Image (tube, rainbow, N blue to C red):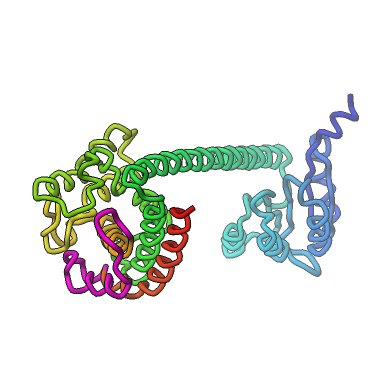
Amino acid sequence: MNIEKELEKKTILIADDAEINRGILKLIFEEQFNILEAQDGEQAIEILEAQHDKIVLLFLDLMMPIKTGLDVIEYMRDHGYMETIPVIMITGEATAETDVKAYEYGVSDIIYKPFESRVVMRRTINILELFENRINMEKKLEERTKELIASREKLEKSNEFLVNALSSVVEFRSLESGEHIKRVRYFTRIILNCLMKYYPEYGLTKEQIDLMVNASALHDIGKIAIPDSILLKPAKLTPEEFKEMKKHTTYGCELLEHFKQDESDFYRYCYDICRHHHERYDGAGYPDGLKGEDIPIWAQVVSIVDVYDALVSKRVYKTPYAADTAVAMIHNGECGVFSPKILDCFDRVKDVIVQSSELMSYADSNFVQN
């Protein structure tokens, strides 16, 4: 039983060049702790290197040969040991300047020679308990953070699955292969990254962009509610039919309401993109006639990439335009007015968009043929 208790003992390192001081501290603590001794700062560092994972507390003399107590603390700070090993400075020459410097270095307490055993014991136990509680709280916080991250990742995967499933329904109904959604997502990310770089006033972050890109896949979800006779009509729509087609923006929002679990950022991006990706910067869009920066920036981005992809892609009602023609149509306002900042970013990345659009269209045509 004594052997088991001995094995359970925690280890204290006492670093002091005066043997009598080490002896006094050893006498105070040897029943409760395993004791390691160092007679100078250099030896203390060697012991820390070898056994830092076992040491729970360091008594450290301030003035020692070869390396001082402050040298040892500096070493511990450089190696991250101050986070796990509390240090109690022991000194017989106290000055306000030295005390302040020691505390600034991260010392947990300072005791002065000669030692009062009961005071030293009580202060030591208090510090060990505080450190142990802090470390336990940090471990619990780390575990909880990991759980929250795992939960968020699981939710993001669920959201992505739902987004892909719903957007695929629209693609199949409109007789498309699914590449339109991929292109919209890809082009949306490119332009949002450009906005983040050149227009920091929007305050975009990588995390927000990831959510906006996923939300962009649902921009046309409301087309589920559009009759086939209109959605698949291989000719120009009548004014009445076009009026019904425009309702896909509000139909989509009604659908999203049924899936809403909370007022999250992701839901807001989905809703705004679904409702406002046909708004135009001059107020001539629909369904709400929003103007200028009243249109959420994420909806503005999806708007221009949706227009570009519609122009260069084959539809039941049209043949595709060449990339240069599509870019020119966007600039001259044939597809509505876009903000100068959106157009600037579009111009900055249009070569990448055009090239990737051609590659994706080639893959799309192979998909349809096969």
Lateral position of residue 197 relative to residue 86, left or right: left
In the displayed structure, 299 sits above or below 145; it is below
Lateral position of residue 40 relative to residue 114, left or right: right
Rendered residue at 84%/52% (across/down):
37
Is 328 within the magenta? yes
**Residue 1: percent from left, percent from top:** 89, 24
Looking at the picture, tell me which residue is in the foreground, 12 or 336. Answer: 336
Looking at the picture, tell me which residue is in the foreground, 149 or 331. Answer: 331
Task: Answer with the quarter of the image where residue 49 lies.
Answer: bottom right
**Residue 41: percent from left, percent from top:** 79, 63
Rendered residue at 74%/58% (across/down):
61
Is 299 within the magenta? no
Magenta residue span: 314-342
Looking at the picture, tell me which residue is in the foreground, 139 or 97. Answer: 139
Task: Answer with the quarter of the image where residue 255 lies.
Answer: top left
Task: Answer with the quarter of the image where residue 173 lies.
Answer: top left
Lateral position of residue 96 relative to residue 266, left or right: right
Rendered residue at 32%/59% (across/down):
314
Rendered residue at 41%/54% (across/down):
179
**Residue 286: percent from left, percent from top:** 14, 52
Looking at the picture, tell me which residue is in the foreground, 66 or 54. Answer: 54
Lateral position of residue 231 relative to residue 366, left or right: left
Q: How many marks?
A: 0
**Residue 349: percent from left, percent from top:** 37, 72
In the displayed structure, 19 sits above or below 28; it is below
Q: Residue furthest top?
A: 1
